[in-house]
Image (tube, rainbow, N blue to C red):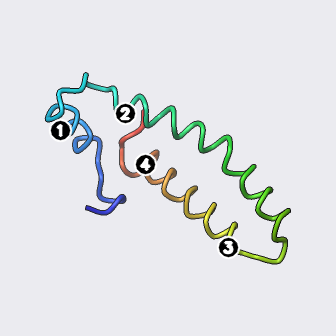
Amino acid sequence: MRYDEIRRSDIQSLEKSLGVREGKFIKNLARIEKSIQIHVHDVRTQLKGEAPESTVGDRITDEIIQRVKHFREHGHILP
C-alpha cells in the first residue's frame, strides 16, 4: 500500500489487530505531524546554509510537506 492510499480506517484496523487502544496511533501521528510542521523549515534553512547551491534539501522538504498535507487533507487520518 502506498502512503497516499492509507486512510483512517486502515489505521483503526491496525490498532484493533494489534490490541492498541483506539485512537492511540492517530494521536501519536498528530503529535508527529505538528513536530514536522515546526521543524521542516528549520531543516530546509540548515541544508541551504550547508549547501546553498543544492536543490536536494528543497526537494526533500517539499516532499515531506506534501505527504503531511495529504494525511491532513486527503487521507482523513489526522484530526
Mark 2–mark 3 distance (CA, rounded to whole Å): 30 Å
Q: Residue 25, position in %: x, y? A: 34, 33
For the residues bearing labels 3 and 4, Cβ distance under 8 angstroms: no
**Residue tagged by mark 2?**
26
For the residues bearing labels 1 and 2, Cβ distance under 8 angstroms: no
Give the residue type that dot 4 points to. Phe
Q: Which mark is residue 54?
A: none
Residue 18 located left or right of residue 36? left
Q: Residue 5, position in %: x, y? A: 29, 58
Give the residue type that dot 1 points to. Ser
**Residue tagged by mark 4?**
71
Q: Residue 57, position in %: x, y? A: 69, 67
Q: Is mark 4 on a helix, strand or loop?
A: helix
Mark 2 neighbour class, 10 Å CA radius: few under 14, some 14 to 19, many 20 or more: some
Closest to the camera, between mark 1 and mark 4, is 1
Sequence order check: which comes first, mark 4 or mark 2?
2
Residue drawn 72% across and 53% down? Answer: 43
Q: Residue 49, position in %: x, y? A: 85, 62
Residue at the top extreme of this rendering: 21
**Residue tagged by mark 3?**
56
Sequence order check: which comes first, mark 3 or mark 1?
1
**Residue tagged by mark 1?**
13
Sequence order check: which comes first, mark 1 or mark 2?
1
Mark 1–mark 4 distance (CA, rounded to whole Å): 17 Å
Quadrant for the N terminus, please.
bottom left
Residue at the front extreme of this rendering: 50
Mark 3–mark 1 distance (CA, rounded to whole Å): 36 Å
For the residues bearing labels 1 and 4, Cβ distance under 8 angstroms: no
Closest to the camera, between mark 3 and mark 1, is 3
